[in-house]
C-alpha cells in the first residue's frame, strides 16, 4: 500500500494491521471481522476512528437507544440508497468503538478521501461518549431508553448520564432526533441549546392500559411523578409532569393511522403520506419514525423516504424468516422487558388471527455478558399475554430451565423440550411440528447468534456478514 509523503505513518500502520486481522479472522472462520480489525487497529493508533471519520465530507450521523437502533439505522440506510446518497454504514450491528473502527477499516474506498459520502453509525448506548467525541456527528438520533442489562449498564439513569456526556462532546450545531413519547429521551433536550427534531406516535388506537413495566417514573427537573394521558408501550406515551409543567413535545415527525400485519406495518406521516414497510410491530413503527426524522433533518426527499422505508430489510435475528425442512421459522430478538412485551403483543395478534388461535413459540435465554447475567428481568415480561394461545413451546439457551419455569407460571403448556444445545433444540422443534408449521423463536442476543449459527450450518440462513 503506497501513501503520499504527508501520510500519517501511525494511521497507515493501524490500517494495515486491522485489515490483516480481518483477513485472518475470515480465513480461520472466526467470524466476519466486524470487531477484531478495529480492536487491533486501536492498539496501533488509538485515534484511528477519529482520523478515518474526517474523510467523510457529508459528516456523520449516529443512531442509539436501548431498542431499535439496528433497525432504525438500516431504515435510514435504505432511504439513503433510494436518495442516491453515498454512505458507509456499520450494517452488521457491531456498534462498539472496535466495531465502528472495523467498518471504517474495511471500507473498500479507504485510500481515497470521501468528500461526497456520509458516515452512518449505529452506536451502543455506553459507547456514545467515545463515539461522539471521535466522529463529531451532525445529527444524533435516540430511539428510546429502557432498563437493559443492569449488570452492564446499571439503571436507566446511568445510561442517561452517559448520553448527556456524549452531548457535551457533540458539535453545538448538531441536531438531536428525539423520541417525544419517551420522557427519558425527551429530557436530553433539557441540556441542549441546539436544534431538536421530535418524532412520536399519534394514534389512540394503539394506546393501552397494560403497557408493561415503567422504566421512567420521575421528572429529572423537579422529581415529580409523570402522569399519562395514554401509553403505547412501557413508559412511552403522552406524558406530562404535574410538578414543573413539562409535557410531551408535539412531534415534528408523527406516525398516525397505524395498521399492523404479520409481515408488514403501514402508517401515515403528515407531510409525507402513507408508508408501508416489511416489518411489523408498534416498536418498528417507532424505529421507522426515528429514521424518517433523521432523513428529514438531512433534507432527503419524501419520495425517497417512502421508497426506502418500503425496501428496508430486517437485520439478522430481528423478524428474520427462514425456511427449515418445510417449516417457517421466525427469529424475534428480545433483550429486555420492554422489547419482549412488544414481541408478545405482536404474537398475541398473530394468535388471534390463526385458525386454531394458537402459536408455536421457542424462548431462548442466555446469561452471557452481551445478554446481561442477571435474568430476573424475565419476571417483568408479560408472558401471560399468550396464556391459552400457545400450541407448543420449547425452552432453550444456557438458562433454559429457568425459562421453562417462568413459562409454566405464565400459564403456557409444558415445554416440549428444554435443552441448551441449539442443534438439539432445532431437532426437537422439527420433530414436534409438521411440515408447513410456523414457529416463532424468541432469543436473547447470544442465544440468537447460537441458533442462527445452527441455521447457517444447515444451509437455512447465510452468515450475517454475507447478507446483502
Image (tube, rainbow, N blue to C red):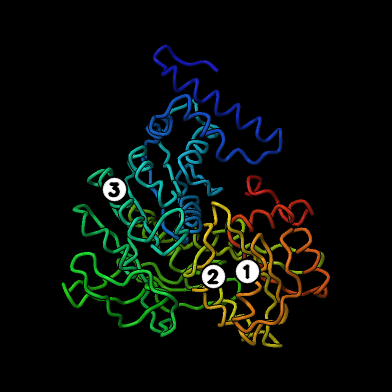
On screen, residue 94 versus residue 141, left or right, reads: right
Residue found 50% across the figure and 58% down from its top = 71
Side of 351 relative to 121 (left or right): right
Q: Secondary structure at mark 3?
A: helix
Q: Is residue 428 above or below residue 16?
A: below
Q: Which mark is residue 165?
A: 3
Q: Earlier in the sequence, mark 2 or mark 3?
A: 3
Q: In the drawing, what numbered circle is on residue 378? A: 2
Pointers 2 and 1 in contact (C-beta within 8 Å) = yes
The x, y position of residue 343, in whole percent, is 55, 72
Task: Count every numbered label the image shows and give the total.
Answer: 3
Whether residue 265 can be seen here: no
Figure check: 426 above or below 239? above
Mark 2 vs 1, N-terminal side: 2
Looking at the image, is mark 1 or mark 3 earlier in the sequence?
A: 3
Q: Is residue 415 above or below residue 353?
A: above
- Disc 1/disc 3 C-alpha distance (Å): 37 Å
> Would you call the spot at circle 2 few (<14 residues within 10 Å), some (14-19), or many (20 or more)?
some
State if disc 3 and disc 2 touch (CB < 8 Å). no
Spatial CA distance of label 2 from label 1 is 9 Å
Q: Could you tell me how far apart the alpha carbons at marks 2 and 3 are, in whole angstroms?
A: 30 Å
Residue 105 locus on image (x, y percent) = 51, 32
Amino acid at each position: 500500500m503506497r501513501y503520499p509523503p504527508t501520510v500519517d505513518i501511525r494511521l497507515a500502520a493501524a490500517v494495515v494491521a486491522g485489515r490483516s486481522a480481518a483477513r485472518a479472522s475470515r480465513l480461520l472462520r472466526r467470524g466476519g471481522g466486524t470487531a477484531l480489525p478495529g480492536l487491533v487497529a486501536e492498539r496501533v493508533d488509538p485515534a484511528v476512528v477519529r482520523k478515518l471519520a474526517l474523510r467523510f465530507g457529508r459528516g456523520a450521523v449516529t443512531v442509539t437507544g436501548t431498542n431499535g437502533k439496528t433497525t432504525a439505522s438500516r431504515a435510514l440506510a435504505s432511504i439513503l440508497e433510494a436518495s442516491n446518497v453515498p454512505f458507509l454504514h456499520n450494517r452488521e450491528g457491531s456498534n462498539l468503538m472496535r466495531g465502528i473502527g472495523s467498518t471504517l477499516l474495511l471500507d473498500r474506498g479507504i485510500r481515497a478521501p470521501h468528500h461526497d459520502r456520509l458516515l452512518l453509525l449505529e452506536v451502543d448506548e455506553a459507547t456514545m461518549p467515545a463515539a461522539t467525541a471521535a466522529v463529531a456527528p451532525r445529527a444524533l438520533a435516540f430511539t428510546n431508553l429502557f432498563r437493559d442489562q443492569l449488570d452492564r449498564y446499571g439503571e436507566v439513569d446511568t445510561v442517561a448520564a452517559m448520553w448527556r456526556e456524549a452531548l457535551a462532546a457533540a458539535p453545538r450545531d448538531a441536531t438531536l432526533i428525539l423520541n417525544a413519547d419517551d420522557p427519558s429521551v425527551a429530557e436530553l433536550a433539557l441540556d441542549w441549546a441546539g436544534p431538536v427534531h421530535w418524532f412520536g406516535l399519534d394514534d389512540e388506537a394503539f394506546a393501552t392500559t397494560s403497557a408493561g413495566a415503567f422504566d421512567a417514573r420521575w421528572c429529572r427537573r423537579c422529581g415529580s411523578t409523570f402522569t399519562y394521558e395514554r401509553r403505547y408501550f412501557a413508559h412511552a406515551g403522552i406524558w406530562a409532569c404535574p410538578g414543573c409543567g413539562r409535557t410531551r413535545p408535539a412531534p415534528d415527525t408523527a406516525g398516525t393511522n397505524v395498521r399492523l400485519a404479520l409481515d408488514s406495518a403501514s402508517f401515515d406521516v403528515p407531510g409525507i403520506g402513507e408508508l408501508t414497510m416489511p416489518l411489523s410491530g408498534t416498536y418498528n413503527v417507532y424505529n421507522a419514525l426515528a429514521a424518517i426524522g433523521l432523513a428529514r433533518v438531512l433534507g432527503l426527499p419524501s419520495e425517497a423516504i417512502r421508497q426506502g422505508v418500503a425496501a428496508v430489510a430486517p437485520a439478522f435475528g430481528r423478524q428474520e424468516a427462514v425456511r427449515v425442512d418445510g417449516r417457517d421459522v421466525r427469529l424475534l430478538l428480545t433483550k429486555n422487558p420492554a422489547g419482549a412485551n412488544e414481541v408478545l403483543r405482536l404474537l398475541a395478534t398473530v394468535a388471534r388471527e390463526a385458525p386454531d388461535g394458537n402459536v408455536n413459540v421457542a424462548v431462548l435465554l442466555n446469561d452471557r455478558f452481551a445478554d446481561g447475567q442477571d435474568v430476573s428481568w424475565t419476571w417483568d415480561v408479560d408472558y401471560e399475554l399468550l396464556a391459552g394461545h400457545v400450541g407448543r413451546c420449547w425452552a432453550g439457551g444456557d438458562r433454559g430451565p429457568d425459562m421453562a419455569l417462568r413459562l409454566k407460571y405464565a400459564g403456557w403448556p409444558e415445554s416440549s423440550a428444554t435443552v441448551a444445545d441449539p442443534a438439539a433444540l432445532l431437532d426437537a422443534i422439527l420433530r414436534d411440528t409438521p411440515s408447513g408449521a410456523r414457529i416463532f423463536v424468541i432469543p436473547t442476543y447470544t442465544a440468537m447468534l447460537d441458533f442462527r449459527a445452527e441455521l447457517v450450518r444447515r444451509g437455512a440462513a447465510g452468515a450475517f456478514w454475507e447478507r446483502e
